[in-house]
Amino acid sequence: MKIVNVEVIPLTGATADGGWPQGHEPQENLHTLLEVSTDEGLSGVGSVYTSGALTAGALKLLWPLLDGETALEPERVTEKLRQATFWQGRGGAVEHAISGLDIALWDIFGKATKQPVSRLLGGNYRTSIKPYGSILFDEPDALRRRLEDTVAHGFRAIKLGWRPFGRRSRRFDELLVRTARDTVGERVELMVDAGGSEQFWPHGLNWARETAKMLADYDITWFEEPLPPDDLAGYIELTRQSPVPIAGGEVLTRRQSFMPWIEQRAVDIIQPDCTKNGGLSESRRIAWMAFDHNVQMVSHGWNTAVGLAADLQLAAAMPVARYVEYLTPTAYIEDLTVDPFRLGDDGCLQIPDRPGLGIELDPEKVERYRGELP
């Protein structure tokens, strides 16, 4: 079964606000789907957390290495792409494109063998998992309304991130966290994401340590990205001192980039994003490395339905997995599939057990959000 084509599908029209200081427009293209076709009629889909223009540019570089390759060996094929483009594409948009290709090839592999990807990744440790609704911080009254809506949709864990947290004062940060806890009560888990990967992040170890102490008073499950993503030494010291678990790693690509963070215990929770770090193949390696070092792995997923499906398959195949990230609300998750994702009464998602990623995209819905390539 040979690869004969890759279609690039930029998603626009319903792009969620990511919290960046420059603002956002729904027409902005931040997510791209890939459809890989084979000479035997099977196809698979992947998701890339990168614009269609950058993905298409990367594919021009990758296609001579991909054309005619087998569609049934995702790990070998994508490692070949990674090794062969090392001087032009180490990390960045090329690695992001490889990520989407890898996910699509796993989807094909599952369909060809009539198995869910989780079984091909090693086997199923669970059939359901708790998603945490991922939302942005806001002014207290708006935040309260957003939290009430998120709980009403069935989420029993919620992550609050980025602006205005960490951008005004310690007193205001505590007001936001207190508002959140008072709104959802004690039975809903809360996580806090400072968004330290924002450009020109102003805070260092002392701010992060004191903020972590405040978060502990409100039973926060973890503190994410409290420092800039290159401050390895700062993370090591913060993780050693913090009364709440420290999480990070969403901006890293390639398994080798994760090694020092795991081996030196720079975080309690490592967060690979399979739509940009190399795909399911790299995420599986990272997750097992984390497991062997007793570091928890929780997939980062500011995502699409395809990316969430990949995260669910990975979560099923890991010995220890407690959560998946679920960006909400977003049409790119909730309005692309034939059968929508649904939370159970226990706040958990069933992990699809159909062949491949276990989801079916609705062609008409995909067309609704398909953007133009430059």
Image (cartoon, rainbow, N blue to C red):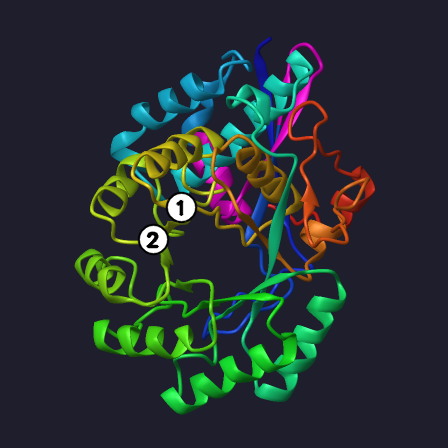
Say which of 289 and 9 sits in front. Answer: 289
Q: Earlier in the sequence, mark 2 or mark 1?
A: 2
Say which of 145 and 48 sits in front. Answer: 145
- The residue labelled by disc 1 is 296
**In this picture, is 23 found above or below 99?**
below
In percent of width and height, residue 367 lies at: 76, 44
In percent of width and height, residue 345 lies at: 77, 54
For disc 2, the neighbor class at 10 Å (few under 14, some 14 to 19, many from 20) is many
Identify the residue at image location x=51%, y=48%: 49
Say if residue 10 shows up in the picture: yes
* CA separation in Å, label 2 and label 1: 6 Å
Span shown in magenta: 36-60
- The residue labelled by disc 2 is 268
For the view shown, which residue lies furthest in the left direction?
233
Query: In the image, what residue type sits under mark 1?
Result: Gln
Identify the residue at image location x=70%, y=33%: 352
In percent of width and height, residue 199 lies at: 34, 69
**In this picture, is 171 found above or below 196?**
below
Query: In the image, what residue type sits under mark 2?
Result: Asp
Question: In which quarter of the view is residue 110 placed?
Answer: top right
Instruction: Confirm or deny contact between disc 2 and disc 1 (CB under 8 A).
Output: yes
Say if residue 33 shows up in the picture: no
Secondary structure at numbered mark 2: loop
Say which of 364 and 272 sits in front. Answer: 272
